[in-house]
Image: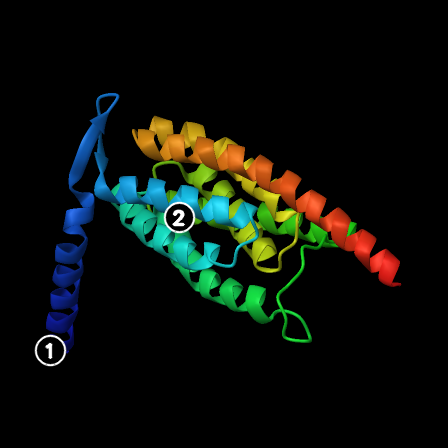
Amino acid sequence: MEGALSMGRTMIDWLVAVVAPLNAVAFTMWGDPVSWAELLGFVTGGACVALTVRRSVTNFPVGIANSTFFLVLFASAQLWADSGLQVIYIILGFIGWRQWLYGNTERTPLPVRGVSRRHFMWCAAAVAIGTAALYPLLLSVHDSAPFLDALTTSLSLVAQWLLNGKWIESWYFWITADCIYVPLYFSRGLNLTAVVYMLFLTLCVAGWRAWRRELAVERETAGIAG
């Protein structure tokens, strides 16, 4: 037992040493320090959303890197739900990467598609249930913004699940989450991250418009083929 505990402490010390450079201050913005993790999260986050707007499968490896940087950042800010969310994002990123490449029954890339009204209502219900379940948990661990953290976590998980299936409705959930994230991160002194999410919000609207055009073309093509 003592050997296992010692090994665990060694691993924790190693992880702390590895991420320490990412928590170092890169520069100061509006009187608040910006770490390397926040800066790299800015760069990879913007690239990830831009690639998603273009329906490029490379959004997934870039997104996995982005989630890694934000995991370090949010853990240092004690936003535990957002930290845990990044771990889930990394897992879902690998799953989505494969789905976009081989998601069809013919093992061909997925097309842009839309969900049914019933499907959408189930997604909205999942957000409500997830928020209600996470809120007391986050209160118990003294999260710095328990309700908003629970809500944005639930919105983001549903959005990522829809994105993995290339459903256009994923953009509705991303846009809603980003509208909450921007003031939340400003209030926590994560100014650059707040600016990132303002960029995300703009790109999400552009993504919704681009995917809507693509969906219209695919439906028209299917109609002609039929």
Residue 208 appears left or right of 153:
right
Residue 165 appears left or right of 10:
right
Residue at the (37%, 52%) spot, across then down: 67
Q: In which quarter of the image is residue 24?
A: top left
Taking depth in this image into account, of 161 and 52 the one nearest to the observer is 52
Q: What element carries label 1?
A: helix
Residue hosting label 2: 81
Q: Which amino acid does label 2 sit on?
A: Ala
69 to 190, vertically: above or below: below
Q: What residue type is labelled 1?
A: Gly
| Distance between the alpha carbons at the discs numbered 2 and 1 | 31 Å
Residue at the (89%, 63%) spot, across then down: 226
The 10 Å Cα crowd at callout 1, few under 14, some 14 to 19, many 20 or more, is few
Q: In which quarter of the image is residue 27?
A: top left
Taking depth in this image into account, of 156 and 66 the one nearest to the observer is 66
Residue hosting label 1: 3
The quadrant in which the N terminus is found is bottom left
